[in-house]
Amino acid sequence: HGHGTMVFYFTTRGGYMVYMGKDKFENEALIANGWDEDVWFHVDDMSSAHVYLRCKEGESWEDLPNDALMDCCQLVKANSIKGCKKASVKIVYTPWSNLRKTADMAAGQIGFTSEKLRRYMEVSRDKEILKRLGKTKEERFPDLEAERRARDTDEVRRRKAKTRELRKEAERKEAERRKRAEERSYDRLFEGAAAGGAGGEEIEATEDDTAALDYEDDFM
């Protein structure tokens, strides 16, 4: 499932990778093997290609630049049999993780887990955008399942490395704290020994000068 699927790849303004299935059967493979970083685009209430944009590392789908969003919307509109004939259409987009597929749905059909996570954009055809995207188009037959597995393995590895890093940092801070505490107690010991040698009365004065002055004032 997902092996040998024909997928079209494009590059948007801002350098985002965008991919699209050839037909509804290809769409099935894309739905099944999407990534958590992917955002799904479709013409609202009409059949169209499923277009996915892959967010950059650490980026939220809600912070995507307008140029990249517009490029995806243009692709979706151009690849909708009804939508491409209309002056303007409404495009819906949502994170891949919000897509819901149940066994009773037809090929290419999709639902949403949360309606709140949908965003909309109204677009009219822009030939210049489509021409530029067309120049970046590549046809590939990726093993979508293997790519998804590799991504998951990589994420686990990254998470473990991050945890190790945080643990090391915590250990380093703890070692520093201990060292400072030891130095302070050593300094106090040393000060105590030095002050003790000069006679007990002087110990009061090491606290701070104002305390020593107050002490003297009481006796004036």
Image (cartoon, helix red, strand yellow):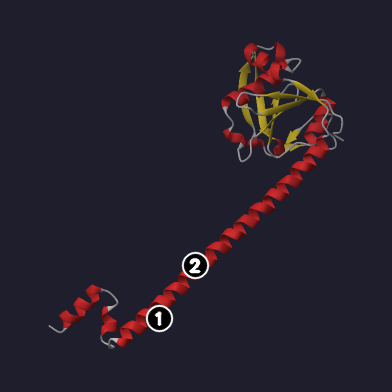
Q: Position of residue 212 (x, y in %)?
A: 22, 78
Q: Position of residue 147 (x, y in %)?
A: 79, 38
User: Residue at (62%, 18%) from the top-left corner?
Assistant: 123
| SS at badge 2 | helix
Residue nearest the viewer, comparing 46 with 125: 125
Instruction: Tell me the quarter of the image containing the C terminus.
Output: bottom left
Residue nearest the viewer, comparing 209 with 82: 209
User: Residue at (65%, 57%) from the top-left corner?
Assistant: 164
Give the farthest residue toward the left.
220
Question: Residue at label 2?
Answer: 177
Q: Position of residue 140 (x, y in %)?
A: 81, 26
Residue nearest the viewer, comparing 112 with 133: 133
Q: In the figure, residue 174 lies in which quadrant?
A: bottom right
Q: Work out whether 4 lies above or below 168.
A: above
Q: Is residue 9 visible?
A: yes
Q: Nearer the viewer, mark 2 or mark 1?
A: 1
Picture disc at residue 125: none
User: Label 2 amino acid?
Assistant: Arg
Q: Work out whether 194 lies above or below 82.
A: below
Q: Position of residue 111 (x, y in %)?
A: 75, 34
User: Label 1 amino acid?
Assistant: Leu
Give the mark nearer the N terminus: 2 vs 1.
2
Q: Residues within 10 Å of mark 1 (few under 14, many from 20)?
A: few
Question: Residue at label 1?
Answer: 189
Q: Residues within 10 Å of mark 2 (few under 14, many from 20)?
A: few
User: Residue at (32%, 86%) from the top-left corner?
Assistant: 196
- In space, the residues marked 2 and 1 are separated at their CA atoms by 18 Å
Q: Is residue 47 visible?
A: no
